[in-house]
Amino acid sequence: MQLSRRRLLQGVGASVAAGILGAPASAAETDRTRLFVHPRTGLLDGISELVDVIEAVGGTTLLEFDNFEFVVAEVPSNRLGDLRGDRRVASVEEDDETGIPSDWSPSLLDFLNPGDRSDCSTHPDQRPSWGVERIGADAVEPDGSGVDVGILDTGIDSEHCCLEVADGRNFTRDGISSDYEDRHGHGTHVAGVAGATDDGVGVVGVAPGANLHAVKVLDDDGEGRYSELAAGIDWCMSNDIELISMSLGGESGSSTMDRVIEAAHSAGHLLLCAAGNDGNDGNGSCEAETMTYPATHDDVVAVTAMNENDTLASYSSVGSAVDLLAPGTEINSTIVDNQYARASGTSIACPFVTGVAALVWQTREEDGPGPTEQVREILTESAETVLGTCEEGEGLVDARAALGDDRATDGSERGRLTDGGWLRSMFEWIADLIAALVDWLAGLFR
């Protein structure tokens, strides 16, 4: 049976998918391993022939992609040797797990949760989180309008009063492909940080005008696999979604995911990821290298988390691959069932950076993927030094400085060289001085 490109079979579990394809009973009765299978270039006539190779060893193809030349399959464990030994197969790699920390526990906020949650008019007046104010996102004009942001997570509550979901896709076993609703809460909280609407009630995100896309790559328990993450990135690439935000992580790296990330980056997408919640030594050192994957990849913007008192969060992972710091502790945001909650983690810090990236992307006035490196450079060069250690990478993400405002809230000079920062102000000052001089000289001859 020929599968359509990039789809999880009917959005259901692998056992059901195997039944649909009529897998042999013997294959269903033995242990099965989920794999990425890569074809050997030049020896196969398209992906359909690779599917035949997999079926010949009693396997089932689960996923194909639009932008990648490999498939995801389940193969009887006792036939792995046969698959690896087939000359038409270049390599196979186990499909490892990814997800969010099992102890993620948001606290509902009574002062933000009205008695009648279904009636948006009863929601309390809008209150930006301390994080939005700390990075200056409440004091800038751009709002991310026209920029597409993929939230690769547990889905998004599309009925929340403070969220507008453009569209989405479900790549997990929980529900059909069009069911990207969040039944966990993590994805909705992350989405609210990045782009809760500026509608006067509840909370507001860093980029309230951005187009949020619910890319469900983690199930209702907050668990997933690299193959589902790859499918989510593939979907973002096919739909020209500029920013790919990943508040998740796995314990091991993956050569297949490396290819996926590099392909998306090369195509002009900016990928951002939480550094992980495996902690740090608390001494300013990054030698422990506690970061999770894919935050460790060079083509991913890795984000650590800080507390409201400008200290590194004790839970925050660190490592040499850290790029930026962002607020991550006790952050108020949206959650499922039209409610609001406070939560912590690098997964909450990541969408702060995603939101600022959307603001910067908007100012580039480019439609679709493209200015990845320019935006990343602006984010890092405009960052504010807070810790002065490797734990913050280039520093705290700064919306004002990234957008060219070289003054802090109190009017003091930031003195930071950015795209549109004090260098631009200096040139403007010189231009004004020259103009004034020309006017004065002209007046001498009147």
Image: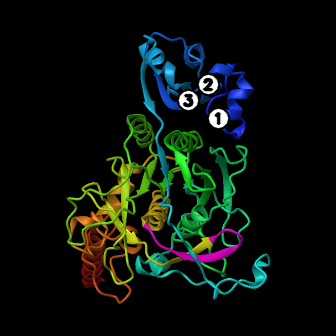
Q: Mark 3 points at which residue?
A: 31
Q: Does the segment drawn in magenta span residue 98?
A: no
Q: Name the residue under label 2.
A: 60
Q: Depth check: give the residue in front, 15 or 87.
A: 15
Q: What secondary structure is marked by label 2? A: strand
> What is the x, y in percent for residue 237?
53, 41
Q: Depth check: give the residue in front, 228 or 69.
A: 228
Placement of 342 over or under 90, stated as above or below: below
Marks 2/1: CA–CA distance: 9 Å
Image marks 2 and 3: residues in contact by CB distance under 8 Å: no
Earlier along the polypeptide chain: callout 2 or callout 1? 1
Seen at 45% across and 37% down, the residue is 260
Q: What residue type is labelled 3?
A: Asp
Q: Which amino acid does label 2 sit on?
A: Thr
Q: Is residue 224 visible?
A: yes
Image quarter hosting the C terminus: bottom left
Q: Which of marks 2 and 3 is in front?
A: 3
